[in-house]
Amino acid sequence: MIDLHNFERRLRAFSIDISLAFLLIFCWLILAYNFEQMPNQTKAFIAVGIIYLVMIVPHFLKKGQSFGKRTQKMLIVRKDSLDSVPPLWLLLLREIFKMTSIFITFGLYSFVGGIITNNRRDGRTIHDFIFRTKVICLTPTVSGSYLNKSTGYVNDQLKGWNSHD
């Protein structure tokens, strides 16, 4: 297992997730325009719910990976282990905390978190400290193949990424 940190890959992964969320919100708002009897607060609540779902649902499919992290070949693991993905409940709390912090601070949390991540050797940020996690790169590059496969859960996550599987 390669314990690399790459700020740009983490930023791209988050951008992919947020872009997907906003694409779905845009589709929802176009659809909701025709629901004149629905209160605007309900429409807004559903739009915010879409963002949370985009960040949470992928963990039910591939624990430790959002859609963006999967495309960037990254994985959320426990701070003290490379092969140990946190339990689902902890991953969900981590995502809820992260997104709520972004909403409450109007995005300032992302900016501060990015500065912290970029200036740390291990690439951890605020929610990583709170939930004792870290994000690792599974390959040296996004287009690269896996050099050293681990056993257990991480090995299962790698299936389908390497053309030699």
Image (cartoon, rainbow, N blue to C red):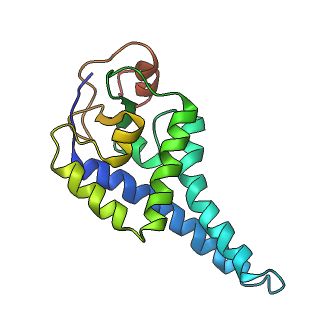
Residue 83 in view in this figure: yes
Left or right of 32? Residue 91 is: left
Give the x, y percent position of residue 84.
41, 21
Give the x, y percent position of residue 57.
60, 45
Q: In this view, does 16 lie above or below 27?
A: above
Left or right of 29? Residue 129 is: left
Residue 62 in view in this figure: no
Q: Quadrant of residue 4?
A: top left
Q: Is residue 8 above or below residue 60?
A: below
- Which residue lies at the image location 39% right of the left edge and 44% below the top edge? 69
Given residues 133 and 14, the one toward you in this image is 133
Q: In which quarter of the image is residue 142?
A: top left
- Which residue lies at the image location 49% right of the left edge and 50% below the top edge? 97
Which quarter of the rendered picture does the N terminus lie within?
top left
Give the x, y percent position of residue 98.
45, 52
Give the x, y percent position of residue 66.
47, 44
Left or right of 151? Residue 63 is: right
Q: In this view, does 89 lie above or below 23?
A: above
- Which residue lies at the image location 37% right of the left edge and 51% below the top edge? 13
Which quarter of the rendered picture does the C terminus lie within?
top left
- Which residue lies at the image location 56% right of the left edge and 32% below the top edge? 88
Given residues 59 and 81, the one toward you in this image is 81
Q: Which residue lies furthest to the right in this view?
A: 37
Number of marks drawn: 0
Q: Residue furthest top?
A: 151
Left or right of 34? Residue 147 is: left
Given residues 96 and 61, the one toward you in this image is 96
